[in-house]
Amino acid sequence: MPVALVLESPHKLVLRAIDLELTVGENDVRIAMDVVGICGSDVHYYRHGKIGPFVVNAPMILGHEGAGTVIACGKKVRNLRTGDRVCIEPGIPDFSSRPSRIGLYNLDPSLTFWATPPVHGCLTPEVVHPANLVYKLPDNVSSAEGAMVEPLAVGLQAVHKTGVSAGDVAFVLGAGPIGILVALSALSAGCSRVMIFDPASQKLDIAAQFAGVEPLYRHRGSIADQIARATGGWGVDIVYECSGAAAAFDGIADCIRPGGTLACVGMPTAPVPIDIVALQVKEIRIVTVFRYANVYDRAIALLEQGKIDVKPLISATYPFSKSIEAFERADAAHPEDVKIQITMR
């Protein structure tokens, strides 16, 4: 039996053998995992054993940001072959469902997603996955970058949903992995400038490495005042709320121009008060984002062409044998850390 990183209960991770179903169906591929990133949801399960209604009631393997190498293919697989380096889209929908048939397979209620109870994740040596959700990596895109495609896909989904126009000015709340990748996605889609805020100045310093990303530091005044100065009092075209913090919504309408857009990307863990009237009097459009659909190929193309560089966001890499230490570091939430990854072999 393979040895996997198993969450037994809150703050109890173990590396142990676990029985997994690894039979390769005719439309599946078997993948030897190479690199897995630690997501905020993984850390949340590690801390609390649940996220909303999703409760870890039985031991569960963590991890859903993965890249690996194909080691076996089902007899009907034509898009991949043994030896291909790949990244994996971790949600498996019913492609015959009504949401899937209109292109919204991420909203299929029967979708299963790696490391979401009771489904195991990919912090294990090998996985089996449908081939149509596995994507070949170009030669110039490393496996570490390939494991960043999953969070980058969230950024591209947000930009797709908001309909960025050339020259738009955007503002991102939260400079974690998703926030920075949303900012980079917005720039790649045509935004002329993207401002970003986070309480941790260290994260803003990392975001500031990217051309076109302008950090807003707390010591320079209120967010609304800084945005007003930057836009001549007009406001930004789009705000991407990526923190999920209730406080982030306080006065958020003041930052948005009349007729602008508020995109809710971060997922709050508690009810969030929103001043609806403040949004109404500006006719601000509210857009919500849940994971992604039909964007993995675009994310890979942006990495291949050098339009987006995710390498500066990888803060630390741990071997699989030290994956518990990696989670302990992620749980400590060092402000200078953006993404921690684990190499599987």
Image (cartoon, rainbow, N blue to C red):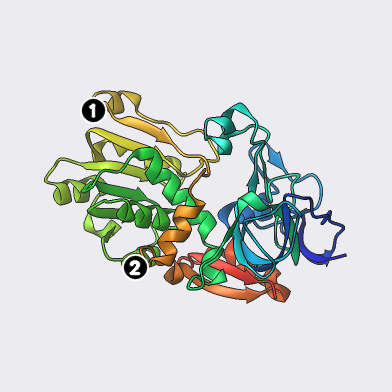
Residue assigned mark 1: 282
User: How crowded is the residue under tag 1: few (<14 C-alpha within 10 Å), some, or many (20+)?
Assistant: some
Quick one: 215 or 132, which is closer to the camera? 132
Residue drawn at 28 percent across, 48 percent down: 170
- Residue 205's disc is 2
User: Where residue 186 sits: x, y (%)?
Assistant: 33, 51
The C terminus - image quarter: bottom right
Disc nearer the start of the sequence (1/2): 2
Label 1 element class: loop
Give left or right: position of 144 versus 225: right
Label 2 element class: helix
Residue drawn at 48 percent across, 48 percent down: 295
User: Where residue 120 sits: x, y (%)?
Assistant: 74, 52
Quarter of the rendering containing residue 98: top right
User: How crowded is the residue under tag 2: few (<14 C-alpha within 10 Å), some, or many (20+)?
Assistant: some
Give left or right: position of 48 versus 141: right
Q: Amino acid at mark 2?
A: Asp
The N terminus - image quarter: bottom right
